[in-house]
Image (cartoon, rainbow, N blue to C red):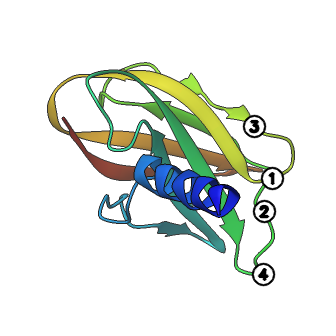
Amino acid sequence: MLRQTCITLMFVMIAACSRGTDVAAPPPQSWGSVVVSLESRPVPPRVGMNEFLVIGTEASGKPAWNMMVTLRTDASGDWRQAIQDGESGVYRKALPLGAGAQILYVRLQRGGDEAVLEFPLKVE
């Protein structure tokens, strides 16, 4: 009985620590055959340093791992190169954010092609 109670308590504690699905990320966007989605750490983004994960997926479902991804939070600011996480299609970069609504600019480059996507953020 004690073991069963401990296991139940452990699952309740894990559920209490997890985040619900009520926090929305910006919707994915497309660039040619690549679907690009964005995640932030922490969720939702807060004032100060935040890590961004840019996730590229080919239409076939395979990771889009052969891109150069750079980010900025100011339309006229310097681009900061994201670090590729192996060949997983995940690119990471931490950037500082101020309070309020703003845009994360994501520049994608592959071969001779280039595009800039804009992801709206609400920073708490």
Q: Are marks 1 and 2 in contact (CB under 8 Å)?
A: yes
Q: Position of residue 59 (x, y in %)?
A: 70, 79
Instruction: Look at the numbered disc 1 and give the secondary structure of its residue.
Output: loop
Residue 114 in view (yes/no): no
Q: Position of residue 111 (x, y in %)?
A: 77, 50
The picture quadrant where one finds residue 40 is top left
Q: Residues within 10 Å of mark 4 (few under 14, many from 20)?
A: few
Which callout, 2 or 3, points at the residue further toward the start of the chain?
Answer: 2
Q: Residue at x 33, y 37 (%)?
A: 45
Give the residue type that dot 1 points to: Ser
Measure the C-alpha gap from mark 2 to mark 3.
Answer: 12 Å
Using the image, determine if residue 33 lies above or below residue 94.
Answer: below
Measure the C-alpha gap from mark 1 to mark 2.
Answer: 5 Å
Measure the C-alpha gap from mark 1 to mark 3.
Answer: 8 Å
Using the image, determine if residue 70 lies above or below residue 58.
Answer: above
Instruction: Using the image, tell me which numbered label, if any, was put on residue 63.
Output: 2
Q: Residue at x 32, y 43 (%)?
A: 44
